[in-house]
Amino acid sequence: MSGRSTDAHRTGMSLGVGVVGVLAGLLFATNASLFAGEDNRQPVDLEDLVRSEAARLDETNARYQSLEDEVNELLARDASVGTGDPLTPATEMAAGRTAVSGPGVTVSLSDSPLIHDAPEGVSADSLLVHQQDLEGVINALWSGGAEAITVQGHRLGPLTDIRCVGNVLLVDGNVYSPPYIISGIGEVDALRAGLDQSPAVRTYREYVDRVSLGYSVEDEERLEMPRIEGGLSMEYARLPGEEPISWQPAAGPGLADLDDLGDIG
């Protein structure tokens, strides 16, 4: 009995070992077949597998970085060029992306000193410099051929926002008090002619005579104006009666189209 029991036990062990051997053989064969067809790589152990996969990961990361750099370069090129048209000096100037220096004029506007003792029959509003007065001078300088304009030293561009609130001036969120200094670079005689021919400036000068609003024009041998920093993209814009449209600063207005710049915003 004991001999037969021992033989049976040995037979069971032999079968178990055989099954394990068969399964191990299948596992190794499957592992080898998975890697045999890919770049002739046949790692024989985990160390080789880790090393080969690490090398492939490095290659993938390098390729990803190369593609990312290419995409960023294309996006930067698209942002600067827009529709594909090259930026011209006139476009850069109109967008204020070029620093400018040269002769020009400086116009100073200020509230009337009578504001604290208004004459009878004169409203307090008539004694203050208003937004339309500033815009009148700015548009007159553009009409006179100004290449660049600053208000309180702030360079004007296509997206400049000018607002008057009471007796203070807001230019792109910066707050200024009178006197308001507007400078334009260009041919001096042409700039002065633009001011003289402007109906808005003539109306303002009538109030200069009537209620002592401040107004002066000085010739400048040399003015220095910095380039506009920061973005030039609108989130949206709307034409009267139409849906909002997107806008990118691909092609700013030409110098001849800047008469209404002061009305932007």
Image (spheres, rainbow, N blue to C red):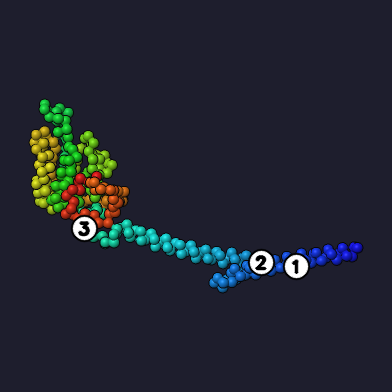
Q: Which residue is mark 1?
A: 18
Q: Is residue 144 found left or right of 73 in the rendered image?
A: left
Q: Position of residue 82 (x, y in %)?
A: 29, 58
Instruction: Kindly tell me whether residue 8 is visible in this rendering.
Output: yes
Q: Nearer the viewer, residue 173 or 21?
A: 21
* Residue 214 percent coordinates (x, y): 14, 37
Q: Which mark is in front, 3 or 2?
A: 2
Q: CA distance from mark 3 to mark 1?
A: 87 Å
Q: Amino acid at mark 2?
A: Leu
Element class at badge 3: helix
Whole-percent x, y for residue 81 in the image? 29, 59
| Residue depicted at 9% across the width and 38% down the height | 206
* Kind of residue at disc 3: Ala
**Residue, disc 2:** 27
What kind of residue is marked 1? Answer: Gly
Residue 221 or residue 248, whichever sits in front: 248
Point out which mark residue 90 bears. 3
Q: Quadrant of residue 215?
A: top left
Disc 2 residue crowd, few under 14, some 14–19, many 20+, Cα 10 Å: few
Which of the marked residues, 3 or 1, is nearer the chain's N terminus? 1
Q: Which mark is residue 61?
A: none
Q: Residue at x 26, y 52 (%)?
A: 227
Residue at image coords 31%, 48%: 235
Query: Is tag 2's residue or tag 1's residue first in the polypeptide sequence?
Result: 1
